[in-house]
Image (cartoon, rainbow, N blue to C red):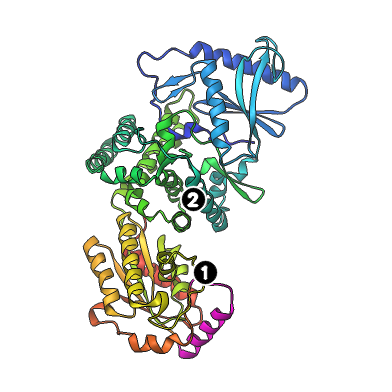
Amino acid sequence: MMDASASASASGAWPAQAPAGAPNCEAEQQGQRDLLRRLRAGWEGRGCRVQVFETHISWIYVVDQLAYKFKKAMRFDVLDYSTLAARRHCCLEELRLNRRLAPTLYLGLSAVTGSVARPELDGRGALLEPAVRMRAFPQETLWSARLSAGLLGGAEVDALALRLARFHADAELAAPDTPWGGAATLDRLGRADLAALAGLPGGRAVRAQLARVARWHDAQMAAPARFALRRAQGRVRACHGDLHSGNILTLEGRVEIFDGIEFNDALRWIDVISDLAFIIMDLRFHGRGDLAARLLRGYLGASDDYQGLAVLRYYLVMRALVRCKVCLLGARAPAPARPSQQLAQARRYLALAVRGLARRGALVLMHGLSGCGKSYCAGRLADPLEALWIRSDVERKHLHGVAATTSMAAPARQGIYDAASDAATYARLLQLARAGLGAGVSVIVDAACLRRGQRRPFQTLARELGAPYFIVDLRADEAVLRERLERRASGAPDASDAQVSLLAYQRAALEPLTPAERRHALALDGGASALDRRLAALAGTIRAAAPPS
């Protein structure tokens, strides 16, 4: 069974009514209804159980293990299903585009044939109505349902991150002569979304929120260079376009993404970060900021598109407005289902967009000798802090073009651990921290940070950006350090190359925290019992200073 919300209509990119001069499709749409009603009667006459779902722009008929998606005769500024030829073309496009991500769900094109009086599916005769034929699936497999039931897990999010990174890497690039992803296109779409929300009920408070977002949007459009840079970097591609939790499912242990936009180029040829931002926003909306952060970490780690953080906040806000508009349109639809609930959700999405304008993250610097538990603790803090976790061990190897788990062990100050590599690694960490904080995301810098000169730039950055700043000062007994490093050396491949022999050098190089630094320090015994409970308390302290919105 397919979810009634699982439609490209969820992009909410069309106005509440057809534009002036658009053809009146009411008669043709009524003809479609009559045709499909007779088709359904024929199925049921043969003993088939038929379920019907209706969205803004389609009807979905589920029969046995198959689902047939019919496009409604309609035309809006950004969508044209007004003719039989247009609907057939869009069905074919839907198949072509969605098979990139869900080839096992999209089976082919079907046709209503026969006669108007006695229609049949895929029989003889002229085409009366096209349909996308899909594999049906249980509604509880949808991420929207799994989120509501509290069942969506980290492994699924990790799988989505990897799947998206690969999909975006392979997706077709926007041609240089197209406007997609540029500030002019974004400005047009953003203004249309804001205009559609002008009638959102809620009085003065809602009007003030919309005005605030509109001013912020104008300010973003006044600085178009970063959007142009993203295009120049090849980050505007043929994406999914409607990546919310109603269009993702976990079926038979596999994460599938379906129902991407086929009907409008401007909504599909977008920055890959805009694609990602939709589901990150949706996870936050459903109260799972921890999973949203996990998705962001996984995607950036797989794609290395950290430059996308420069536009992440913009797309997160605008995606929330899109969903706000969807809810408003749903409440205004003929015979709407639960209109008061739809309007309440619209106001929640608007509130999320407004909070995103000023969302502020904390900067957390790990500090301590190898083996004290920096990476373990950083990993345990990342989800509750909804943080970006950047590791010196990973970024150092990235700078040298080697995989994170490739062993590059060398004596202190030699090989990829020489002074120049140290300086380049900390510069990279600082760059990524700046990008993350600029996007309103908390950042955990997982590095030894033994020298004051390595720590000072991060404190300066936090002061510059007004971000709460913490140093997690980790200690552990010598026996614990040695045992952990020996176990790591003999275990599975790890990003860290630290060996027991490094400890003596590190102790000599260690420069204690200054009194000024200690005002930001949170001491933690990395070898203590009940460490996870202590980390939970520490996370609470940090969240109080920079609560995720």
Judging from the image, what secondary structure is the residue with disc 2 in? helix
Quick one: label 2 or label 1, which is nearer the N terminus?
2
Give the residues drawn in magenta, as a range. 477-495
Which of the pair 251/261 is nearer the observer?
Answer: 261
From the top left corner, tell me how far across and down residue 325 is, in percent.
39, 34
Q: Which residue appears farthest toward the right when viewing the image? A: 46
In percent of the image, x 38 and y 67: which residue is there?
A: 444
Q: Would you name the residue on which mark 2 appears?
A: 165
Q: Give left or right: position of 224 versus 347.
A: left
From the top left corner, tell me how far across and down residue 453 is, in percent.
26, 77
In percent of the image, x 44 and y 19: which residue is there?
A: 75
Dot in front, 2 or 1: 1
The quarter of the displayed image where residue 463 is located: bottom left
Q: Quadrant of the N terminus?
A: top right
The quarter of the displayed image where residue 39 is located: top right
Residue 110: in magenta span = no
Judging from the image, what secondary structure is the residue with disc 1 in? loop
Q: Give left or right: position of 94 versus 305.
A: right
Q: Does the rendering let one see residue 6?
A: no
Name the disc covering residue 405, or none: 1
Q: Give left or right: position of 404 versus 307.
A: right
Q: Is residue 422 above or below residue 49?
A: below
Q: Is residue 297 above or below residue 4?
A: below
From the top left corner, tell me how far across and down residue 290 is, in percent.
46, 58
Q: Does the rendering let one see residue 212?
A: yes
Q: Give left or right: position of 544 versus 113.
A: left
Name the disc covering residue 329, or none: none
Q: Is residue 403 above or below residue 173?
A: below
Q: Mark 1, residues whose alpha carbon is within 10 Å: few (<14), some, or many (≥20)?
A: some
In percent of the image, x 29 and y 46: which residue is there?
A: 226
